[in-house]
Amino acid sequence: MTAGAASPSAQAAVRGQADRRLALRLAVIALSVVLLAGALVYALAKGSQEISISEVIDALRDRDSVSKATAIIVHEVRLPRALVGALVGLNLAVSGTLLQGVVRSPLADPYILGVSAGGGLVAAVTTLRFQDFPPDAVPVAAFIGSLIGALIVYAVAWDGSGVTTTRLALAGVALTSMFGAFTTTVVVISVEGGGQIIFQWLVGGLYTAGWEDANLIAPYSAAGLLLAMLLAKRANVLALGDDVAQGVGLHIERTRFLMSAVAAILAGSSVAVAGLIGFVGLLVPYVARKLVGSDFRFLIPVSAILGAALLVGADTASRVTLPQALDVGDIEFPVGIITAVIGGPLFLWLVRARRAQW
């Protein structure tokens, strides 16, 4: 046996460790699916009219097995809203995962980096100011706005040799503030007496979500998730650093652009149906990375599932739990408030924890 060769026992130990890591990651994926299923069923059961979980399951299996009123509430009111919430959460979480891979920092998020703000501004303009604009084309327009926002932030943060987390964060916050002001202006001058619509655009909400929105966002979610998975191996190589990535023949800037474009597709389509929901793309990848590590082949699907579960749960809390806790049952809070309360402190902690690296 040569000096550099590993012994059979060492090789077996390495294989055993890899197998245990794979089993753990698959278990996390399975548990995440169970969590999402539980969040969906709970969302369908809770509301102004309580429905038992057994009735919800019966209605999903066969709507004729329950009363007509229960079937309408489950299938026509709560189910489309829950599905839209799940898809929006999936989109934002995967978008954040990709952006964090692009900049190699856990501080990246479509909301923080101005990606959502660019999509939100274009979506607001096309929806509220152009009455004849095709609704099916709004996500496409929002994607273009999101991509423009990402490019502006990256260009501002670029100093000729690269970008830093500090410059990206500052540029993203500035662009989000500017685009947010423009979006507020567009919404205010376009909506009369539509307080919930204003909240939907500016804070993020699912007030008007229905089957039309679910059908609108679903193709973008499916395409974006598929493209993200196809980029997973490149993202893993990119995470090793520019020198290593170049050494193995990876086109670094092309990969960053593709990852940013897919992130813009996902964020833009989410903004088009749910407005500006922040911090999902920051919080979920952070948790997913703690659970399954930094391998994007597992990080992306876990982030997608957990993002869907988070937003479905947050929406249920915003429309049922929080109003009941505050004894204002006739008021529905924007889901963006819930995600901001959870994700905002995490962002501040990450900024403080990483200040020495700036």
Image (cartoon, helix red, strand yellow):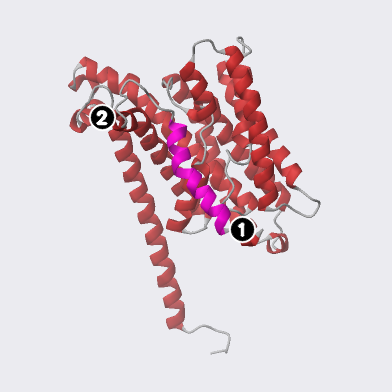
Taking the magenta stretch, the answer to whether it contains residue 350 is yes
Q: Is residue 231 visible?
A: no
Q: Position of residue 28 (x, y in %)?
A: 37, 54
Q: Quadrant of residue 271?
A: top right
Q: Which residue is mark 2?
A: 45
* 276 vs 252, nearest the viewer: 276
Mark 2 surroundings within 10 Å by alpha-carbon count, few (fewer than 14), some (14 through 19), many (20 or more): many
Considering the whole magenta stretch, tell me its main secondary structure. Answer: helix
Residue drawn at the location 35% of the way across and 45% of the way down: 33
Residue closer to the observer: 43 or 91 = 43
Amino acid marked by disc 2 = Ala
Say if mark 2 contacts mark 1, CB within 8 Å: no
Describe the element under mark 1 as helix, strand or loop.
helix
Residue 69 visible in this rendered orientation of the protein: yes
How far is the residue under mark 2 from the one under mark 1?
Answer: 44 Å
Q: Which residues are magenta?
A: 335-353
Q: On residue 355, which mark appears?
A: 1
